[in-house]
Amino acid sequence: MAHVEEPAVEVTAVTAVDEELVAALGRLLPQLSPSAPVPTLAAVRDVVAAPGTTLLIARDLQEGGRIVGVLTLVVFRIPTGVRAWIEDVIVDETARGRGAGEALGRAAIRHGIARGARTIELTSRPSREAANRLYERLGFRRRDTNVYRYAP
């Protein structure tokens, strides 16, 4: 009988918020944005309960199921159709290169398509070279566009 290697990462959509998730976000978010406030239990519950929002987590099965990555997918309807947007993709620096980012990305694409999204978009800083290579491998194509931000 051939040995089949078990996947090292399991991705699931969050349906219930607990202290483990809040602690994981507290560890992961500063790796994406040092200035981002660490979310409270109530704030994470609001994210999970928000219509159209799916919070995906990646667990490293070789580390006892420790949460090593997160991704937020938002699916919304506008006059031109159903669209999706990926935000806050974070893989723990200690777990990078082991498939968590790819597993999260593939799961987000499946969720977005299943909910009728015509397109799925994301942005990534040019300095995040490995992440940008991953997005291209997953089928994302760079658009010729300007991204603007208004911060009141």
Image: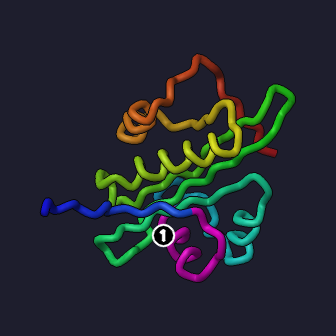
- Which amino acid, mark 1? Arg
Residue 131 location, x and y as percent? Answer: 41, 41
Q: Residue 61 vs residue 25: left or right? A: left
The residue lying at 71 percent from left, 55 percent from top is: 53
| The residue stretch that appears in magenta | 13-28
Residue 102 location, x and y as percent? Answer: 40, 47
Q: Secondary structure at mark 1?
A: helix
Q: Reply above or below: 58 against 21.
A: above
The residue lying at 14 percent from left, 60 percent from top is: 2
Quarter location, residue 137 = top left
Q: Residue 115 vs residue 88: left or right? A: right
The residue lying at 66 percent from left, 28 percent from top is: 147
> Which of 107 and 88 lies nearest the eye of the viewer?
107
- How many numbered circles are shown? 1
The residue lying at 68 percent from left, 77 percent from top is: 41
> Which of 113 and 38 lies nearest the eye of the viewer?
113
Which quarter of the rendering shows the C terminus?
top right
Q: Reply above or below: 86 against 20.
A: above
Would residue 132 be visible to someone looking at this image?
A: yes
Residue 20 is a magenta residue? yes
Which color scheme did the rendering employ for the protein? rainbow
